[in-house]
Image (spheres, rainbow, N blue to C red):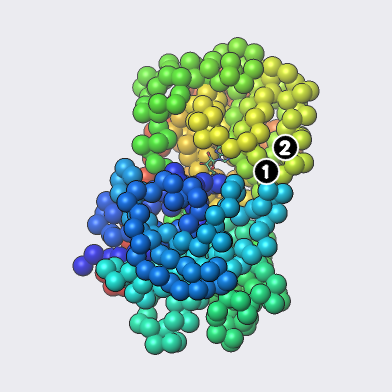
Amino acid sequence: MTVCVLHAAAEMFPLLKTGGLADVVGALPLAQSQLGTDARVVLPGFPAVLAGLADLEPVADLGGAFGAGNVRLERGVLPPHGVVVYVVRADVFYDRPGNPYLDAAHRPYADNDRRFALLGWAAARIATGADPTWKPHIVHAHDWHAGLAPAYLRAFERGGAPRTASVITVHNLAYQGTFAASEFGALQLPGDFYAVEGVEFYGLVSFLKAGLYYADRITTVSPTYAREIQTQAHGAGLHGLLQTRTHDITGILNGVDYSIWSPSVDDSIAAKYTASKVAGKSKCKAALQERMGLARDDDALLFGVVSRLTEQKGLDLLLSAVPDIVQRGGQLVVLGTGDPALETGMKNAAAAHPGAVAVELGFDETLSHLIIAGSDIVMVPSRFEPCGLTQLYALAYGAPPLVHRVGGLADTVVDSSLENLADELATGFVFDTFDRAGIVGAIRRAFALKARRTDWKAVVKRAMGQSFSWEAAALRYAEVYQGLTGR
Ligand code: ADP
């Protein structure tokens, strides 16, 4: 019998994206449906979500909840593949312009607890029959935004509803959705759920902890991150709980949607290319240099960055190494948005090295493709990285990634050490210690390899030959579901 899964998430590419979560929610349900799973998605009714769906129709009136006025459930499909998407219509909560989480001053909305409690609650309502024509066997919650879904399922069960299994996927443990304990009363959960064995976390309400506590299974987006989050160093205060659930935790590497991220089909780049006919990549490099105001020099080793500018991404470390790139004749292009201090640091680096360092602040899907295609090397020097998609895209576009050996970066990039070159394994540059010496050492190895034409070409070709398919990931998720449903 077909397994029915409802993904509950805040973002889905191409409707709405602020990071890798959207890429996953945009690709995984489709890969699952291609394997025969009936995978659907429930999203908050943000304006961009409503605008991007086709055939929206009302499904149910969910009544008043969380002070959002009358909440309605609608259902549409996402073109062109037709994944079914439920939308929680509560315009008081979601009809706000710009970022889904932050107000115009970049502060989290004061009612984020109720805005995202509603998402989890609506998922649980769908699981308990809100759509008379469809019910999931499994609710699959993503990140803290949907973290309360497993808690509401338990609460509804206590009220007599049949049991629905739940899974939570942690895309980033650093974002926990914590709120003042005084807000608990507004969440419509049984009073005893506010407990250490429940949603309480050091005197606060934690949506992510709720998910980790109440979900039947926990997954995260790479095997190494699955191990790391169970340690004090990387557990963000949740390692104790995660250790108690160690047998329920699985690390499943994200895939790449190669219909979007492949230089052989990418219409946004200057010239298409493949691993066997890589000449177009030089055209992409020249176009990028032109577009960003860098010196037109095919020999300059061009490092690219596409990233949220946050502490996590290690770009402060990169800034300390900019002179090491420039002095060797290299170039750096950065696309990112985020922390004002990092934005200023990037702008200052560009001003200090005109023609060699170029920075664009903002979120620009098309430019992100131009950078991945036009760069010789893509840098992802994150302090921690649950999976990381940028380095996977970089591999596909023959831009060997330069990464810190952590989380999903450690699982997906093989350093160009002499032994890995000899064993024909190398796909990029990996540094172990998160300090200036570490990143500068990797940068120097990159320049050294570029000077060895044959080895460089072999690494580029091998990088392009890596495959991280969503089908493989979907098969692993199917195993997790099977453990819960027997199907
Ligand atoms: P995270 O989810 O932590 O931001 P990932 O590497 O998993 O990191 O995913 C980041 C995704 O967001 C990638 O698809 C990347 O290309 C994209 N991205 C990040 N910053 C920008 C930006 N400024 N403009 C366009 N795309 C961006």
Measured in 3D between alpha carbons, the distance from the residue under mark 1 to the one under mark 2, in whole angstroms, is 7 Å
Q: Position of residue 8 (x, y in %)?
A: 45, 62
Disc assigned to residue 6 = none
| 466, above or below 163, in the image | above
- Write down which quadrant ligand 1 falls in: top right
Tell me the residue that label 2 is attached to.
343
SS for callout 1: strand
Query: To which quarter of the image does residue 423 belong?
Result: top left
**Looking at the image, can residue 154 be seen?**
yes
Which is more N-terminal, label 2 or label 1?
1
Q: Position of residue 116 (x, y in %)?
A: 55, 64
Tag 1 and tag 2, C-beta contact below 8 Å: yes
Front residue (pair 139, 469): 139
| 278, above or below 212, in the image | above
Structural crowding at the residue carrying mark 2, measured as other residues with C-alpha within 10 Å and reported as few (<14), some (14–19) or many (≥20): some
User: Outermost residue, front direction?
Assistant: 70
SS for callout 2: helix
Q: Position of residue 232 (x, y in %)?
A: 66, 65
**Looking at the image, can residue 476 be seen?**
no
Which quadrant is the C terminus positioned in? bottom left
At horizontal 62% and vertical 16% (from top left) the residue drawn is: 300
At horizontal 31% and vertical 42% (from top left) the residue drawn is: 80
Tell me the residue that label 1 is attached to.
338
Mark 1 CB lies closer than 8 A to ligand 1: no
Question: At label 2, which amino acid type do we have?
Answer: Glu
Which quadrant is the N terminus positioned in? bottom left
At horizontal 42% and vertical 19% (from top left) the residue drawn is: 271
